[in-house]
């Protein structure tokens, strides 16, 4: 998924450095700021016992599907009560049969249609164009159906989270945005004009079943006792909750009171201390001081709001700290866009081995 700070392209780099520090499959790996769950998914596949947490509920949904699930969902009870789902013999897995069924259900004028489509908001003071009308209706119908199946116990917990993760992963392919949900585009991107289809998520990540948490990580540092504590907090002042509010609302489907041009849900309790220079370093200090770990690894970059010398000074109080840097081919332009003056932003991995 497109997500600010997604580490998919850096996974083998992170793994190489951790291996140099004697991290071994079979050890416990805690992904403390999980986001898309890409890091936990990768280390689970490598045989680590993964726990992960994030303050966003849609991240928890992804973690539950990728880290906390017990293999391919069977949907036995659902196929029992809705035998029509199982009629297409050309589709091999029950999961894909269920998606085929959901892809065919008629759309509904629910919360997403009414608040985030041009058609649904045409009579309200605030018009929004996050989705084409039919796709908004489709999201509503699929999301309500999943909830109904769960309430009626037609699907178990694992199946519920796999289906929620499927809609969370599919929606971005049809959203009329340039990257985040803090604004919509004023005309339709070709992506948004396509008919929304649920796409199967990759459930091939075998490995030990892990645990997922939907909490502010700072509230659980007293309970952390792990081999590898991996930290990938926000790097700058941009809060994640307002930028991904629509994925949060689709995952929760809780009819929030929304505000403003983008229809953002309340997020006062989802603000990150890592988005503020002063509180970020205090939070890092708290984690390094309080949690128990054999290796602490922190992903960051050279443009982050915590300065390198402050990070090293903080970590060095608790052990031997060092920083690795990789040229990640992202550029920071100077104000007049002169390419000769562009500077590389380096992605960093800090390693702390406690005394
Ligand atoms: C840089 S992103 C993580 C990206 C992730 N490693 C990936 O590959 O997708 C930072 C994440 O930290 C989460 N976050 C920020 N502050 C948090 C906190 N105090 N507790 C839990 N999660 C937090 C955000 O919701 C966001 O998902």
Image: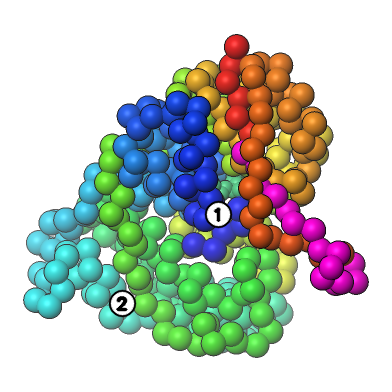
Residue 241 visible at all: no
The residue most toward the right is: 336
Q: Image check: 80 left or right of 97?
A: left
Q: CA distance from mark 1 to mark 2?
A: 28 Å
Crowding at dot 2, Cα within 10 Å, few <14 / some 14-19 / many 20+, comes out as: some
Q: Image check: 22 left or right of 25?
A: right
User: Does mark 1's beta carbon lie closer than 8 Å to ligand 1?
Assistant: yes
Question: Residue 198 location, x and y as percent?
Answer: 35, 72
Residue 201 visible at all: yes
Q: Nearer the viewer, mark 1 or mark 2?
A: 1
| Residue that numbered label 2 is attached to | 103
Question: Residue 86 location, x and y as percent?
Answer: 11, 71
Residue 213, quarter of the rendered image = top left
Whether residue 340 appears in magenta in the rendering, the answer is yes
Instruction: Give the extent of the magenta segment.
Output: 335-349
Q: Secondary structure at mark 1?
A: loop
| 94 shown above or below 25 | below
Question: Residue 84 location, x and y as percent?
Answer: 12, 74
Question: Residue 307 location, x and y as percent?
Answer: 80, 37
Q: Secondary structure at mark 2?
A: helix
Residue 116, quarter of the rendered image = bottom right
Of 344 and 205, nearer the camera is 344
The residue at 71%/79% (across/down) is: 125
The residue at 77%/36% (across/down) is: 308
Of 33 and 197, nearer the camera is 33
Answer with the quadrant where ligand 1 appears in the image: top right
Whether residue 177 appears in magenta in the rendering, the answer is no
The residue at 53%/25% (across/down) is: 295
The residue at 70%/46% (across/down) is: 301
| Residue that numbered label 1 is attached to | 6
């Amino acid at each position: 998924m497109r997500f600010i700070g997604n580490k998919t392209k850096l996974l083998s780099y992170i793994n190489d450095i951790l291996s140099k520090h004697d991290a071994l499959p079979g050890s416990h790996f805690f992904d403390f700021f999980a986001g898309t769950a890409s890091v936990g998914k990768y280390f689970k596949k490598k045989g680590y016992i993964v726990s992960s947490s994030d303050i966003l509920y849609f991240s928890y949904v992804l973690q539950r599907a990728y880290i906390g699930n017990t293999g391919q969902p069977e949907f036995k009870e659902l196929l029992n009560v809705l035998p029509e789902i199982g009629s297409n013999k050309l589709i091999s897995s029950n999961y894909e049969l269920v998606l085929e069924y959901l892809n065919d259900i008629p759309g509904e004028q629910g919360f997403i249609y009414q608040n985030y489509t041009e058609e649904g908001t045409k009579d309200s003071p605030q018009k929004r164009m996050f989705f084409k009308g039919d796709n908004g209706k489709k999201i509503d119908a699929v999301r309500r159906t999943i909830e109904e199946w769960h309430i009626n116990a037609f699907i178990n917990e694992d199946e519920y989270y796999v289906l929620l993760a499927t809609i969370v992963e599919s929606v971005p392919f049809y959203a009329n945005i340039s990257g985040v949900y803090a604004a919509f585009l004023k005309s339709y991107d070709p992506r948004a004009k396509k008919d929304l289809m649920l796409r199967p998520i990759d459930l091939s990540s075998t490995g030990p079943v892990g645990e997922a948490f939907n909490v502010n990580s700072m509230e659980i540092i007293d309970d952390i006792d792990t081999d590898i504590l991996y930290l990938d907090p926000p790097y700058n002042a941009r809060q994640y909750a307002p930028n991904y509010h629509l994925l949060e609302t689709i995952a929760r489907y809780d009819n929030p009171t929304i505000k403003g041009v983008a229809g953002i849900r309340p997020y006062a309790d989802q603000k990150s201390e890592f988005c503020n220079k002063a509180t970020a370093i205090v939070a890092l200090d708290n984690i390094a001081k309080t949690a128990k770990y054999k290796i602490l690894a922190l992903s960051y970059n050279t443009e982050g709001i915590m300065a390198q010398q402050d990070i090293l000074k903080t970590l060095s109080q608790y052990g031997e700290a060092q920083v690795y840097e990789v040229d990640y081919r992202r550029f920071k332009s100077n104000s007049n866009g002169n390419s000769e003056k562009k500077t590389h932003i380096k992605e960093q991995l800090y390693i702390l081995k406690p005394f």
